[in-house]
Amino acid sequence: MAVCIIAAWLSLFPSKIRGVTVYDAKAHFSELVERAESGRSTVITKRGRVVAKIVPASAPQWDRAAVLDEAEAFRKSVKIKGRISVRRLIEEGRR
């Protein structure tokens, strides 16, 4: 619903300038964040000058295979003697 409101609100601006004033950005900040979440950028202006831009955050890039290789290497490097009781570890953690 808020995304529809912000879309209608931004449609009031000329097509070349897809931005909002600092005052409007402050008043509708949560809608601008939702707009960024949906992949759209917004320019913030002050006295007709661009001063900021809200852009979607890129997801951190990580290599799944590298993470799994690292976990496997760690598992092999840890030596555990004897049998481990998960219940006992949970009870010890509650103390």
Image: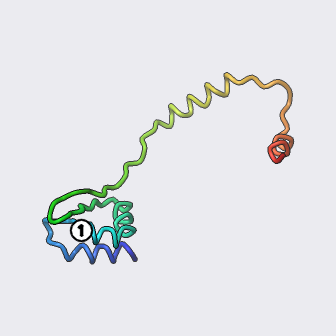
Left-right relation of 85 to 40: right
Q: Residue at x 16, y 66 (%)?
A: 47
Left-right relation of 9 to 30: left
Q: Residue at x 78, y 25 (%)?
A: 80
Location of residue 11 with respect to 60 vertically, above or below: below
User: Between 19 and 38, which is closer to the camera in this rendering?
Assistant: 19
At which x and y percent is residue 84?
Answer: 83, 34
Location of residue 80 with respect to 46 vertically, above or below: above
At which x and y percent is residue 82?
Answer: 86, 26
Left-right relation of 75 to 25: right
Location of the N terminus by quadrant is bottom left
At which x and y percent is residue 48?
Answer: 14, 65
Residue 32 sits in which quadrant?
Answer: bottom left
The residue wearing badge 1 is: 20
Q: Amino acid at mark 1?
A: Val
Location of residue 27 with respect to 58 vertically, above or below: below
User: Between 22 and 94, which is closer to the camera in this rendering?
Assistant: 22
Q: How many marks?
A: 1
* Secondary structure under the numbered disc 1 in the rendered image: strand
Q: Residues within 10 Å of mark 1 (few under 14, many from 20)?
A: many
Q: Residue at x 20, y 64 (%)?
A: 46
At which x and y percent is residue 12?
Answer: 20, 77
